[in-house]
Image: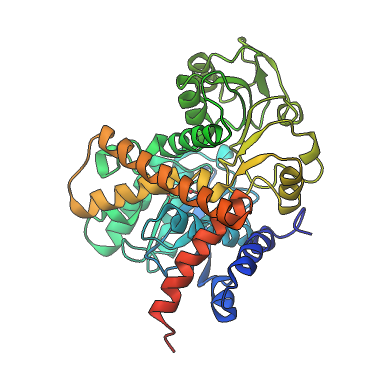
Amino acid sequence: MAEHGSIFRAMLQEFDEAARLLNLDPGIWKILTHPKRQIIVSCPVQMDNGEIEVFTGYRVQYSITLGPAKGGIRYHPDVTLDEVTALAAWMTWKCAVAHIPFGGGKGGVVCDPTRMSRRELEALTRRYVAEIVDAIGPEKDVPAPDVNTNDQVMAWVMDTYSMHVGHTSTAVVTGKPLELGGSVGRREATGRGVMIATREAARHLGRDLAGASIAIQGFGNVGSVSADLLAKAGAKIVGITDHRGGAYHARGLDIPKLLEHAQAHKTVDGFPGGEPLTNEQLFALDVDVLIPAALENQITIENASTINARIVIEAANGPVTPEANNILHQRGVFVVPDILANSGGVTVSYFEWVQDRYGYFWDESDVNARLEKKMYEAFHDVLQTSLKYKVDMRTAAYIVAISRVGTVTQLRGMYA
Ligand code: GLU
């Protein structure tokens, strides 16, 4: 069912389990399982060869109950409305678990950015933003980077929105370059949060990060920063894969050298300091920690029983299907779910939005200390809930999120 079907349905399966345990009011249940708003736009762009292409874009505002919708924009050929809706729901639960005053949203454009020039990407970004300009804003919906988008794309989002409203608006988007209202520490924030979640999970199981063996799928912003910070904390990163290939070293890969290699070749594949590694081999490695940091649906019923790791940290959104999650649970694997494990990114997005609205910027040690505190609290709120309800960390994270969003929904009441 959810294995090869709807990602939104997979999200609902996770939601329903927690809602049952909470005895959630049926009315609130209905509200929380429907997206508030789904926007579909067509974005015509003149390509470099002179031809016009029309790209489909989505922006889903799943919830604005706790504050403005918040969530990234992804550029990928496989983007669908179903996927963007699930990702927007996950943002809602993530912001609630992180205890920041945001709802959840997500955007996506069906395109292959690896085959587009910088000019084409700028034109597409500006047209997409122009199409959704009335729906976004610092108080309404605040986008950010996601798969295949970065600080330059966010700069174009900020500029296009600002030109439309007639004044510079920095707080409309986060993950911007530092020069135009970005926050120090935002680029590394998701990876830093992943490092903190891994450290706390290891501690909970009586282990130490120093000397722990780790395998990571994905070497984009999240995978590479996680690898770097975990290696600096003393862990051995034995295997890393990306969409082109992978590298393995039993005593630990040299991460600074691998970063240089990936910078030059746009992949970890062919790294001279390790042996080749496939995704299949990566998932089956006998390691302390496995970190999927790429896309959805990577650990499925097909490969869940090959996993040998003691801990799985979901740095990506939705990397484990509900069926695979059950298998991991039965096999005693400690899974830290996406809505907790990767919440460091949106937490520092919140700090960026606060700094933009304040017009006063913090230094990096301040940002990192606040992130450390937020991640630590979120991890332990979820851990305590999991011990209290005797459930896994995913169900516990949903329980925390649904209680928070549900309480506010009830307090605010129905507007008819
Ligand atoms: N795209 C990131 C996520 O999935 C960050 C979202 C944000 O900062 O708004 O959590």
Q: Residue furthest bottom?
A: 416
- Residue 271 placed where, x, y %? 61, 15
Q: Quadrant of residue 171?
A: bottom left
- Residue 85 placed where, x, y %? 58, 62
What colour scheme does the image use? rainbow
Q: How many numbered callouts?
A: 0
Q: Quadrant of residue 52?
A: bottom right
Task: Say above or below: 29 vs 324.
Answer: below
Quadrant (top left/top right/bottom left/bottom right) for the C terminus: bottom left
Q: Is residue 75 left or right of residue 189?
A: right
Give the residue displayed 33% in from the left and 52% down from the top.
158
Evaluate whether residue 332 shows in this view. Answer: yes
Q: Residue furthest front?
A: 388
Give the residue displayed 41% in from the left and 38% down from the top.
189
Task: Say above or below: 215 vs 95.
Answer: above
Task: Say above or below: 206 vs 162.
Answer: above
The front one of 205 and 179 is: 205
The front one of 356 and 321 is: 321
Q: Quadrant of residue 141?
A: bottom left
Evaluate whether residue 57 shows in this view. Answer: no
Task: Say above or below: 324 vs 28.
Answer: above
- Residue 196 placed where, x, y %? 46, 35
Quadrant (top left/top right/bottom left/bottom right) for the N terminus: bottom right
Give the residue displayed 79% in from the left and 34% down from the top.
306
Give the residue displayed 70% in from the left and 42% down from the top.
298
